[in-house]
Amino acid sequence: MLSFNMQQDYSKYTPEDQKVWQLLFDRQITILPQLASKAYLEGIKAIGFTRDYIPNYQDTNKHLMGISGWSIEVVTGLIPNKEFFELLLTKRFPASTWLRKLENLDYLEEPDMFHDTFGHIPMLTNLDFCNFLKGLSAIALRFLDNELGVEMIARLYWYTVEFGLIQDPEGLRIYGAGILSSNGESVYSLSDKPAKVPFQVEEIVHTPYIRDKFQEKYFVIQSYKELYDSLPILEKILEEETMMVESN
């Protein structure tokens, strides 16, 4: 089994690190009860995240394993596609251990542990969402050598796992980690400014994503099972379009 053989060295976190976590946590938890999906809000309680201290991954993994069978795999930062999807296929979510500095509270080019943990980990308590991640990874590993296929899979991941919205009974809500860990985009995404359109795989895989500013369009699912049920559609599109490119 793939392993990076890394651990979270909790003793290295400074008082400033703890302060950064507290500031970011407080800022988000103040607004998210009215903005985040029910599954996310239930997940953040179930895994025991608190403002009082940076999560200890060993404790978080005990909660996660008992709920969904997933765990956190410590990595230094962004990792290659193959390793990334191999981890997800085996129910391990890659997360860094470093935290942004006080002067970088609002924006980072590379995701830190606040994004990785606060943004992503609570959703790993939802089994339909977990099944989607695992199923998407199995498909991704089949198309790693195809540039078009990789790009299409990246777009689907971007517009769901990172920047997805869901129609909850309470109203339109956020489940994407890229939004949930961003104070500005949390408010912006549910405002009247960006477009919100129904979730459709074919449209998503043909929609380039935006890295350096808020998204112009968000795709809305009706349930997390809808994500998992969309995977055969993705697979069909990938097979048809990659075959077409290869034959030209």
Image (tube, helix red, strand yellow):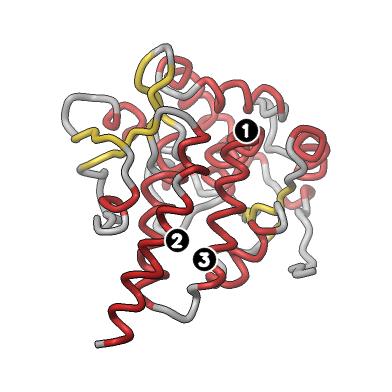
**Which of disc 1 and disc 2 is earlier in sequence?**
1
Describe residue 241's horizontal placement relative to residue 162 as left or right.
left
Describe residue 126's horizontal placement relative to residue 64 as left or right.
left
**Residue 236 x %, y %:** 40, 61
Residue type at mark 3: give it.
Ala
Depth check: give the residue in front, 200 or 118.
200
Which residue is at a point 28% across and 35% down the rendered structure image? Answer: 198
* Quadrant for the C terminus in the image: bottom left
Above/below status of 184 relative to 178: above
For label 2, the residue is 235
Occupied quadrant, residue 86: bottom right
For label 3, the residue is 140
* Quadrant for the N terminus in the image: bottom right
Give the CA distance from mark 2 to mark 1. Answer: 23 Å
Q: Can you tell which mark lies on residue 126?
A: 1
Which residue is at a point 79% across and 49% down the rendered structure image? Answer: 11
Residue type at mark 1: give it.
Asn
**Which of disc 1 and disc 3 is earlier in sequence?**
1
Q: Are marks 3 and 1 in contact (CB under 8 Å)?
A: no
Q: Can you tell which mark lies on residue 157?
A: none
Above/below status of 50 relative to 95: above
**Residue 140 x %, y %:** 52, 66
- Element carrying mark 2: helix
Label 2 vs label 3, nearer the camera: 2
Q: Are marks 2 and 1 in contact (CB under 8 Å)?
A: no
- Element carrying mark 1: loop
Residues packed near mark 3 inside 10 Å, few (<14), some (14 to 19) or many (20 plus) = many
